[in-house]
Image (cartoon, rainbow, N blue to C red):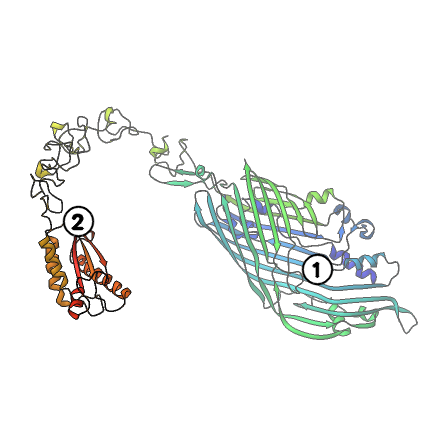
């Protein structure tokens, strides 16, 4: 029993799933339809026009328990226990990855988009968190007894086929920035699956713990824990005949984007004089390429699959009883307790995130940094996953030949160094071949190979070798400059000036006028060679130039009597004078020979007499207000109109509007009332057209009575508004 267990562990633990198929080859811009595996956006905007993959195979293996010399390990007499390096831990991981790219093809739909259809077969085995320390302890134990404290573990094997359709398209292309995206939709057909997971599993094996009837002994097993066993069919039965599972399918998807930095984009673009352009397709145009993708989004449902959960608690179970069962299903169902069962389960694809950065050095030399990260948990029962990996791949790349040298750090497997090449239709390589051949401590190995029919973008023809490709060359068999769309320069008007120098190639003209006949652009009857102002019509008397207006007064100089002084046309372009020097021009001065004021239209202003002042105050005293308020009564408006007429007769005179009250009420109240009434009168006058700068208002309250407040008549006289002239000396 011990030998069987250890042998099985050794065989399985020699394998561990790597992250990426076709390591190194998928970094190649000429990898064609294969590149959809890493990023669906890869198939457009490359030097590949059409690509047909006939068959490709990629196999990965490795582990984190044994380190071996691979060349020695494949020998039949190799002893792992004696020769291999061991790295036992409580969580050793094992697995396998097979990737077959079947007949597939891609082609460019147009300059911006591409389509691919591919078939693919895949198989992945993951064995997670096996207790390697227990295995190591068993190997070191000289007795046949052993004790296994496995704890939790998870084993899943899955094979399936894919038919995928990929569409990729340019999303942004401006100057040195280019972005493309791609989407793959996949139909998934399950080929078979099984998973086994343990929880708190403990096994204690006693080599002679069971006494047989004949007096001999055999082993006994005491165990505890829980095991979940799912499978699509009873495939572990010796009589099992494989059949493709029914009702086992699903859908999947890959999504990716690629950004390219193209600082020299202009050198890959040819544009002719007529605006036609062509962007090179046969060569790489980026300095830096960044790719990001998520692959294997989806799951396959095995509708007729069976999942069972067992309690494997047993004491001194006879080894013979276990050996008498035909398969693991018989052992679990006939010896241990079934706690639950269900029909139908789903297997999640190994969803992963991929990031790549590709740097172009010069003359076909590149270096690629690639990272593959699993987005699924290895702790989940029915989920495949990849190992995380970081690869740095220098490469030389050309149309018919490429060479790769990947250096990778693989989760569980450590560092690996490989090599690969593409030679026309053949691609072959390994992400680990160099480390396998040179190391005595290899934990993994891989290899890939394939055959395809590539059709690359061709270099455009240039029949006349003038640097202009035929599809843009209007004269493909005659050399000519780009400025003339690839045609030689002619002399259409036969004026001995070639058309590239002739500004009027269809009209004969002198060289002094760049091949154009002398014209008359402004239509003034004077040819441009004689016209001092060829773009402005003018009389011959002024050499073809229009008469100017030096002083800008809209009176042309030829009729302006004062061409350097601004003046109106009514005064023949001369400014108006001011004979009396009062600042009012003569055309506006009603008294042009007598100094006056601007407010009085240039005439001297009549002074405000005492009689006028007296009249103003007589009118002002009649202004009535609402009792105790500053609002003017309507019957006072006519008198205010008379006051306004008087004020308008003296437009430069300034007046003070003064408010007074009787002694009734407090002095403070009377002061406020007198101020507000004076202000209200001033406001009315301003709103009626009297200039605000001519008026001021002030309140005196009861401080300036003109008669005694002892009588009602006296109080009435003291309640008044006065309008007084402000003398210039005040």
Residue 247 numbered mark, or none: none
In the image, 207 versus 204, the foreground residue is 204
Nearer to us: label 2 or label 1: 2
666 vs 398, left or right, is left
Q: Which type of secondary structure does the marked residue at label 1 adopt?
A: strand
In the image, 369 versus 442, the foreground residue is 369
Q: CA distance from mark 2 to mark 1?
A: 114 Å
Badge 1 crowding class, 10 Å Cα cut-off, few under 14, some 14 to 19, many 20 or more, is: many
From this viewpoint, is residue 132 visible?
yes
Image quarter hosting the N terminus = bottom right
Counting residues from the start of the chain, the first of labels 2 and 1 encountered is 1
312 vs 504, left or right, is right
Give the vertical position of 539 relative to 193 (above or below): above
Query: Residue under circle 2?
Result: 727
Give the vertical position of 155 relative to 287 (above or below): below
Query: Residue under circle 1?
Result: 127
Q: Position of residue 417 (x, y in %)?
A: 67, 44
Q: Position of residue 141 (x, y in %)?
A: 86, 58
């Amino acid at each position: 029993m011990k030998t069987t267990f250890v042998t099985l562990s050794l065989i399985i633990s020699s394998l561990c799933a790597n992250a990426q198929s076709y390591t190194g080859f998928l970094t190649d811009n000429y990898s064609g339809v294969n590149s959809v595996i890493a990023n669906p956006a890869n198939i457009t905007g490359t030097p590949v026009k059409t690509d047909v993959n006939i068959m490709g195979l990629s196999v990965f293996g490795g582990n984190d328990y044994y380190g071996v010399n691979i060349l020695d390990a494949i020998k039949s007499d190799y002893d792992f226990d004696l020769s291999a390096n061991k790295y036992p831990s409580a969580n050793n991981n094992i697995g396998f990855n097979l990737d077959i790219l079947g007949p597939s093809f891609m082609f460019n739909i147009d300059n911006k988009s591409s389509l691919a259809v591919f078939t693919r077969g895949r198989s992945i085995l993951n064995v997670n968190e096996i207790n390697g320390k227990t295995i190591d302890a068993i190997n070191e134990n000289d007795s046949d007894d052993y004790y296994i404290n496995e704890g939790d573990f998870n084993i899943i094997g899955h094979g399936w086929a894919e038919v995928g359709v990929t569409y990729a398209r340019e999303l942004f292309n401006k100057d040195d920035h280019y972005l493309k995206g791609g989407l793959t939709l996949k139909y998934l057909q399950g080929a078979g699956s099984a998973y086994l997971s343990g929880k708190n599993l403990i096994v204690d094996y006693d080599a002679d713990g069971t006494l047989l009837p004949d007096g001999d002994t055999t082993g006994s097993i005491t165990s505890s824990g829980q095991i979940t066993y799912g499978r699509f069919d009873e495939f572990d039965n010796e009589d099992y005949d494989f059949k493709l599972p029914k009702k086992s399918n699903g859908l999947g998807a890959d999504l990716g984007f690629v950004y390219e930095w193209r600082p020299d984009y202009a050198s890959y673009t040819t544009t002719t004089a007529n605006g036609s352009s062509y962007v090179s397709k046969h060569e790489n145009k980026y300095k830096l390429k960044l790719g990001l993708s998520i692959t294997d989004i989806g799951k396959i449902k095995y509708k007729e699959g069976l999942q069972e959960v067992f309690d494997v608690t047993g004491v001194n179970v006879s080894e013979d009883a276990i050996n008498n069962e035909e398969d693991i299903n018989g052992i679990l169902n006939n010896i241990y307790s079934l706690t639950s069962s269900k029909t139908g389960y789903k297997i999640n694809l190994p969803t992963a995130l991929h990031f790549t950065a590709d740097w172009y050095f010069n003359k076909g030399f590149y270096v690629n940094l690639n990272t593959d990260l699993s987005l699924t948990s290895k702790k989940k029962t029915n989920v495949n996953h990849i190992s995380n990996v970081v690869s740095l791949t220098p490469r030389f790349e050309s149309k018919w030949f490429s060479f790769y040298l990947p250096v990778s750090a693989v989760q569980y497997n450590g560092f690996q160094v490989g090599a690969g090449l593409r030679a026309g239709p053949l691609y072959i390589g390994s992400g680990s071949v160099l480390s396998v051949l040179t190391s005595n401590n290899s934990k993994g190995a891989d290899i890939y190979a394939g055959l395809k029919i590539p059709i690359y973008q061709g270099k455009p023809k240039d029949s006349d070798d003038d640097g202009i490709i035929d599809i843009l060359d209007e004269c493909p068999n005659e050399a000519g400059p780009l400025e003339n769309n690839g045609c030689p320069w002619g002399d259409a008007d036969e004026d001995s000036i070639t058309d590239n120098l002739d500004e009027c190639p269809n009209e004969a003209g002198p060289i002094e006028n760049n091949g154009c006949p002398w014209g008359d652009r402004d239509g003034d009857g004077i040819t441009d060679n004689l016209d001092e102002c060829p773009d402005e019509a003018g009389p011959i008397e002024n050499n073809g130039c229009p008469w100017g207006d030096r002083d800008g007064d809209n009176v042309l100089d030829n009729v302006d009597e004062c061409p350097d002084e601004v003046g109106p046309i009514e005064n023949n372009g001369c400014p108006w004078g001011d004979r009396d020097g009062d600042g009012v021009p003569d055309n506006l001065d009603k008294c042009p020979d007598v100094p006056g004021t601007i407010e009085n239209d240039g005439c001297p202003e009549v002074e405000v007499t005492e009689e006028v002042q007296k009249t103003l105050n007589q009118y002002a005293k009649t202004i009535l207000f609402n009792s105790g308020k500053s609002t003017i009564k309507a019957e006072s408006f006519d008198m205010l109109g008379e006051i306004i007429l008087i004020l308008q007769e003296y437009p430069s005179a300034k007046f003070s509007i003064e408010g007074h009250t009787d002694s009734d009420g407090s002095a403070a109240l009377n002061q406020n009332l007198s101020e507000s009434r004076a202000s209200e009168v001033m406001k009315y006058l301003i709103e009626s057209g009297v200039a605000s700068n001519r008026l001021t208002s002030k309140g005196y309250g009861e401080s300036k009575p003109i008669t005694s407040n002892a009588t009602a008549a006296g109080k009435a006289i003291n309640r008044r508004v006065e309008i007084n002239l402000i003398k210039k000396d005040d």
